[in-house]
Image (cartoon, rainbow, N blue to C red):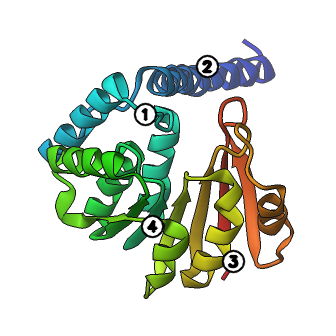
Amino acid sequence: MHQSALSGWLARLFAACVFVPWLLAVQSAGAQFGGVAKEGPPSPKSEAERRALAVLEDVDRNHRYLSVPQEDGRLLRILAESIGARHAVEVGTSTGYSGIWLAIALRATGGRLTTFEIDPGRAALARENFRRAGVDDIVTVVLGDAHVEARKLKGAVDLVFLDADKEGYLDYLQTLLPLVRPGGLIVAHNMRSPAPDPRFVRAITRDPDLETVFLNMDSAGVGVTLKKR
């Protein structure tokens, strides 16, 4: 075989040996990624996580009130754990579904959750769900109007999750943003439906100290806002 032809043949062989396994690995990873997105969380890492996920599944299946979709709950966990959140604040506890997702992350980071709920029945149900999930020791449920109660918060906040009265988002932002540390996040649910006060949208998109992206806008929509360093 001519030397140049031999070199070309060896190059093609080398490419096949390297590229084909790589392509198969990428395809496999893609299939796994698609499976996770559609079928739910992977196997839990610990018994504590297993317990919390079992309660989340039960709440999602039997809830009496609207909750965030599982995809958005998982997003909250990823965001909270990735920034090493030590104190997360939630406005709108409802059944505790989103709070449990946050608490899974906060258990890993050594953090805590303060969550506000105006409805006594929902607050009681959330407390029970937090207990069943084994996270009640790191969650404080504050019963009352968050427009009033949130003003009593002190100390740094790493992540704020807004999922209450949409017309009140701007007030919550103005109250809590000064407490959010540089590099912290403000996560707002229902950015598409039902849409929040347009002034809130302007506030998180036009402030030069903030950086905002909108996710999952094919459903309820989530706004993720970074407080720049």
Q: Is residue 107 above or below residue 227?
A: above
- State which tag comes first along the sequence, 4 or 2: 2
Q: Position of residue 88 (x, y in %)?
A: 42, 67
Q: For the residues marked 2 and 1, what is the alpha-carbon distance in whole angstroms?
A: 55 Å
Closest to the camera, between mark 3 and mark 4, is 4
Closest to the camera, between mark 3 and mark 1, is 1
Provide the residue designation for mark 2. Answer: 16
Quarter the N terminus occupies? top right
Q: Position of residue 190 (x, y in %)?
A: 65, 43
Closest to the camera, between mark 1 and mark 4, is 1
Closest to the camera, between mark 4 and mark 2, is 4
Q: Is residue 227 above or below residue 195?
A: below
Instruction: Name the residue at 67% across, 70% down.
Output: 171
**Which residue type carries mark 2?**
Ala
Q: For the residues marked 4 and 2, what is the alpha-carbon distance in whole angstroms?
A: 52 Å
| Element carrying mark 2 | helix
Provide the residue designation for mark 1. Answer: 65
Residue 229 horizontal side relative to residue 129, left or right? right
Q: Position of residue 27 (x, y in %)?
A: 56, 20
Label number found at residue 228:
3
**Which residue type carries mark 3?**
Lys
Quarter the C terminus occupies? bottom right
- State which tag comes first along the sequence, 2 or 1: 2
Q: Is residue 221 above or below residue 165?
A: above
Provide the residue designation for mark 4. Answer: 89
The local crowd at label 1, few if under 14, some if 14 to 19, many if 20 or more residues have their Cα within 10 Å, is: few
Residue 80 horizontal side relative to residue 9, left or right? left
